[in-house]
Image (cartoon, grey):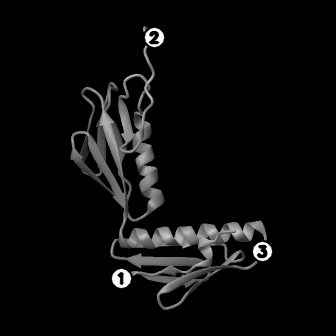
Amino acid sequence: MSRLAKKGLVIPDGVKVSVQGNKYLVEGKLGKIQQDFLSHYVDISVQEKEVMVNRKGDSNVHRASQGLYWSLIRNSIMGVSQGFSKTLLIQGLGYKWELKGKDLVLTVGFSKPAVYKIPEGVILKVENLNTLVVSGHDKHLVGQVAANIRAIKPPEPYKGKGVRYSDEQIKLKEGKSAK
């Protein structure tokens, strides 16, 4: 059973949470997030400065749904008030990325540059030649965009060339001459 979901979520100043039917809407200074929830498993209620997620039964599905929607609402509140970001690093001789309008162009050793179209709700910022920051108010979308960019050229295990997360540790293998 989720112990965290028993507690209410505090709504910070500048954030508005509303529930209509089986949808909840979280609005803040960075944007708004609307999502469906399964109303036959949980009941979401909004008091003055607190959101409560209560389950309607005691089965495992009800308990899991309570924890799930509590976490989703917490991430939505944090996203519209503070935002989320992921940092990517690129490593390799001649590897680079640049922003051209709504596209991210990666030169990563292919015959042609790889072009990634930036979806709505995500902001990309090239801090220096090797660092790219993916930020936005939707945690799922920020993580998915970062994973899609990394998937264009994941780090290889011998020299570590490719795109990786800033906190990712690559375990390098020794070459075939090392015995």
Q: Please tell me whether residue 111 is drawn above or below residue 53 in the rendered image.
A: above
Name the image quarter holding residue 41.
bottom right
**Where does residue 86 sit, x and y in percent of width and height?**
37, 52
Q: Please tell me whether residue 158 is drawn above or below residue 167 in the rendered image.
A: above
Q: Earlier in the sequence, mark 3 or mark 1?
A: 1
Look at mark 2 in the image and give the residue it sits on. Answer: 176
Look at mark 3 in the image and give the residue it sits on. Answer: 58
Q: CA distance from mark 3 to mark 2?
A: 57 Å
> Which residue is the extreme one toward the bottom?
48
- Look at the numbered discs 3 and 1 and tell me whether their residues touch, using CB distance below 8 Å: no
Secondary structure at numbered mark 2: loop
Say whether residue 89 is left or right of residue 36: left
Say whether residue 103 is left or right of residue 18: left
Q: Amino acid at mark 3?
A: Asp
Secondary structure at numbered mark 3: loop
> Which residue is the extreme one toward the front?
179
Local crowd size for mark 3, using a 10 Å CA cut-off: few (<14), some (14–19), many (≥20): few
Look at mark 1 in the image and give the residue it sits on. Answer: 14
Q: Residue at x 47, y 70 (%)?
A: 76
**Where does residue 4 sit, x and y in percent of width and height?**
59, 72
Local crowd size for mark 2, using a 10 Å CA cut-off: few (<14), some (14–19), many (≥20): few
Secondary structure at numbered mark 1: loop
Q: Earlier in the sequence, mark 3 or mark 2?
A: 3
Q: Amino acid at mark 1?
A: Gly
Name the image quarter holding residue 30.
bottom left
Q: How many marks?
A: 3
